[in-house]
Image (cartoon, rainbow, N blue to C red):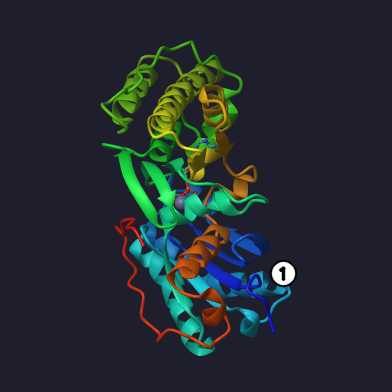
Amino acid sequence: MRSYTKCIFLGIETSCDETSCAVVQDGRFILSNIIASQILLHRKTGGVVPEVAAREHVTKILPVLKTALKKARVKLTDIDAIAVTAGPGLLSSLLIGVNAAMTLALMLKKPLVPVNHIEGHMYANWISADTPKFPIAVLTASGGHNELILWKDHGQYTFLGATLDDAAGEAFDKVARLLGLPYPGGPEIQKTASAGNPNKYPLPRAWVTGFDFSFSGLKTAVLRLVKNHRRTPQFVADVAASFQESVCEVLATKLINAAKQYRVREVHLAGGVSANLRLREWTQKLLPPNTILRFCKNITLCTDNAVMIATAGFYKYKKSADIYKKCHGELVEPWKPIIADPNLEIVNW
Ligand code: KG4
Ligand code: ZN
């Protein structure tokens, strides 16, 4: 008989421009994580074209699934449950993963767990040797989302703030474009900024009230700078560094203010922008004593991947019922369709 602590989840993620399948044991041990990235394809257009992304997911989903199972040394029949990103994201991209997951669950008669992509990013920090402790202040910063959340327990959230306009990742991508840097902008700005002076251009810090964020004014300030200067390599490096400094100072300061106000035990960085080294440094610098800071040291787990979806699915499922029974077929829920929702919101569970 397999023990409680041996539950194998297959995670599927296709919300934007990465086709990913992962096999994760007990929400913690990564048996495989296969990601087919479309970055080079979308570089040609400077951003993601939804129809192009969806077509690519269609051709990649089965090979990625096969490779993920092979790498994990498991068969489809060894999978105990399936977790899939149900939203938010591009509808045509989400549908590929959701349909694949529904078909597999129906065929294998296994439980199917819909996962919110942003919660997925938050659960990436649970793939660690020691289990995080609530309450947690978490900043989710990616291409489409920018939220500050007080995380009180599994599935229990208080939303403290969000962006009023652009998400931080979106700002990185747009500013990179203005500077003539390729897509996606975040890693390119970070790389370019390392040769620049962060104090060269005193760009505005958007200290909007409370825990909300705003990056559109900063983007306009960069646009003005770019229009009035010749785009030499040093100018580009200095603007990249000054822009990165402004974004990271605001993100880290608001996150730490929330951590202090709510007396949390841990502070987490999640989503693609959590890969940013300057953001990590700023957060570490401001971190109150006796507070743990977590982010994924492995950059692959900061950006889109199916490991985080499998992990979130594991905790969601574990809470919803007696996982042992569910994973081992004694109590399999009736199959329910999943609705792919491009605007899916995080709700308590
Ligand atoms: O989470 P993610 O892979 O996809 C979404 O859910 O949107 O995040 C992608 C975003 C992009 O905007 C990308 O430019 C940004 O994360 N990003 C970074 C870095 N790496 C990725 N932003 C700043 N610094 C980085 N090192
Ligand atoms: Zn994401």
Q: Position of residue 161 (x, y in %)?
A: 31, 38
Quick one: 110 or 167, which is closer to the camera? Answer: 110
Compare residues 211 and 60 and report the one nearer the observer: 211
Horizontally, residue 305 falls left or right of residue 209, namely right
Relative to 5, say whether 337 is above or below.
below
Q: Which residue is mark 1?
A: 71
Across and down, in percent, residue 345 comes to 31, 56
Location of residue 114 by image quarter: bottom left
Residue at the image point whose x is 31% and y is 59% from the top: 344
Is 144 on the left-hand or right-hand side of 5? left
In the figure, is residue 345 to the left or right of 31? left
Q: Position of residue 202 (x, y in %)?
A: 41, 12
Q: Is residue 198 visible?
A: yes
Residue at 62 percent across and 66 percent down: it is: 26
Q: Is mark 1 within 8 Å of ligand 1?
A: no
Query: Which one is nearer the viewer's eye here, 216 or 101?
Result: 101
Quarter of the figure with the C terminus: bottom left
Q: Is residue 56 above or below residue 202?
A: below
Q: Amino acid at mark 1?
A: Lys
For residue 216, above or below residue 167? above
Quadrant where the N terminus is found in the figure: bottom right
Residue drawn at (59%, 30%) of the image:
191
Position above or below: 202 against 54: above
**Percent x, y of residue 132:** 56, 48
Residue 183, visible in the rendered structure: no
